[in-house]
Amino acid sequence: MSDLLLRLLEHVHGHVGWLSALALAHPAVLLRRPRRNVFGVAIAATTLVTATAALGALLYPSYRVSVKPALLAATPVVGALFERKEHLGVAALVLAWTGLAALALARRRDAAAADLGRLAFVAYSGAAFMAVIAAGAGLIVGAHRSF
Amino acid sequence: MVAQQSTSARAAVQIGCGGIAFLVVYVTLQLLHALGRDPRLVVALAPIPLFARSVASAACALPAGVAIGCLVRNHRRWLRILPALLAVAIALFVVTIAVFA
């Protein structure tokens, strides 16, 4: 991959990352009432966080070789922040899919729907929290060093 | 109708337990990594540790979720406590990553 393309993808990853962090907060806020139908909103948020994670996974091998060693050498604290951001991103992705799967089952509107709504609320709240931290950490890391 | 509700509750327990299992396995692997004791099987999964840990956690979480969902008898009771368990797993994950990553 050329440097120009890597830089472009890095910028897209950062912007879509912030968008997905905010999008994940939307179903979390709406699901304070567990029986509410937020399936469409949840699909959009989960799609965004999946796209962000896919872009991150695409960039990570190149970043690990060409940027991370220099980042760790110059500013170890920011390098450690980058490590933590990656783990939180993975967890946000898994939690978003857990929430979406729970909401898909809740659409049957049976007796378990309220419990499923509560499960999805916790999953999306956790995903939004982790995504906001990861996006903030990404902003700090990107300000220090990038492709 | 009752059968459909039972299937729905079982699937919900499988999903919830799968999500919790992913976080717990990931935390365990992260702690082993911090101690310098990465399991060989996990290291062999992918050259990049982050990817290897994620794949290993998913590979453990999927069968664990399915198995727990099938083994549990009172699905509705489990479904009521799953949000709290997931919240605990999220807190455990965040603390572990903040301290040991």
Image (cartoon, coloured by chain):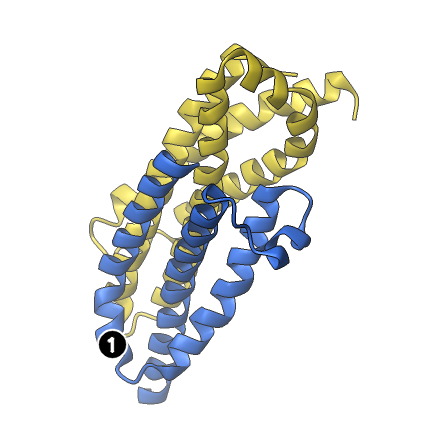
Chain colours: A yellow, B blue
Q: Residue at x 50, y 22 (%)?
A: A79
The location of residue A24, given as percent across then percent down, is: 38, 40
The location of residue A46, given as percent across then percent down, is: 47, 46
Q: Residue at x 32, y 55 (%)?
A: A120
| Foreground pick, B69 / B97 | B97
Residue at image mark 1: B76
Q: Residue at x 20, y 52 (%)?
A: A33
- Left or right? Give the position of A27 relative to B53: left
The location of residue A51, given as percent across then percent down, is: 57, 39
How many numbered marks, from 0 up? 1
Q: Residue at x 42, y 53 (%)?
A: B28
Above or below, A45 relative to B88:
above
- Residue type of the residue flagged with mark 1: Arg
**Which residue, as the protein is rendered here, is positioned at the far front?**
B36
- Left or right? Give the position of A144 relative to A117: right
| Foreground pick, A13 / A65 | A65
Within 10 Å of disc 1 (Cα), the crowding (few <14, some 14-19, many 20+) is some
Above or below, A115 relative to A27:
below
The N terminus of chain A: image quadrant? top right
**Which residue, as the protein is rendered here, is positioned at the far right?**
A2
Q: Secondary structure at mark 1?
A: helix
Q: Chain of mark 1?
A: B
